[in-house]
Amino acid sequence: MHDELIARLRRHAEFWPEQRELAARFVAFVTAHPDCLLRTCGPGHITASAWILSADGERALLTHHRKLGRWLQLGGHVDGEPRVELAALREAQEESGMARFRFVPWSGSELIPLDLDVHSIPARRDEPEHLHWDVRFLLQAEPGQQVVCSPESNELRWFTADELAQVTDEDSVRRLGAKAASLRSR
């Protein structure tokens, strides 16, 4: 049912062997939950996010997330979109106010997720605690665009690698930055 997503997850594991076990957990989750792309999937659902590089590749765009109160990459629910990379692109556009991005082709011509992460989302109002199974892609903003803060954010800001280390201790955010940096140095 979700053959393209499963193929991307398996290819991710080949490129990032340290996430092989996690990728297998993702495949098991997707296989066990045909509704995994919908918010209504009780135990959790697939989400998509983007590590966004500036046009010069020197900085990354983070949002100070309004609900979670932390600096994070941009992303959110896939809302049934089977091509999760398109959901990551949509979220990047909606949350940054920028329209033009390109996927960074770090794996040749094939689009493979940069990172995978599973994290718990706390209960809020009528929504119980659940998991976000986040599939993350590497995007680069086209030059000449201004960021515009969405209602989901307290603030949007570009960070260098050194600045990133000063504003977050989130392992998954630091891991995204390190992976993006390792690809740039290849």
Image (spheres, helix red, strand yellow):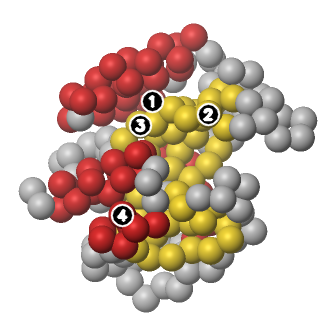
Of badges 3 and 1, nearer the viewer stands: 3
Sequence-first disc among 2 and 4: 2
Which kind of residue does numbered mark 1 sit on?
Leu
Q: In this figure, which residue is indicated by the disc labeled 4?
A: 165
Which kind of residue does numbered mark 4 sit on?
Ala
Q: Secondary structure at mark 2?
A: strand
* Foreground residue among 93 and 132: 132
Can I make out residue 122 in this image?
yes
Sequence-first disc among 4 and 3: 3
Q: Badge 4, how many Cα within 10 Å: few under 14, some, many 20+?
A: some
Q: In this figure, which residue is indicated by the disc labeled 3?
A: 116
Sequence-first disc among 3 and 1: 1
* Foreground residue among 123 and 150: 123
Q: Badge 3, how many Cα within 10 Å: few under 14, some, many 20+?
A: many
Image quadrant containing the C terminus: bottom left
Left or right for 23, reference 83? left
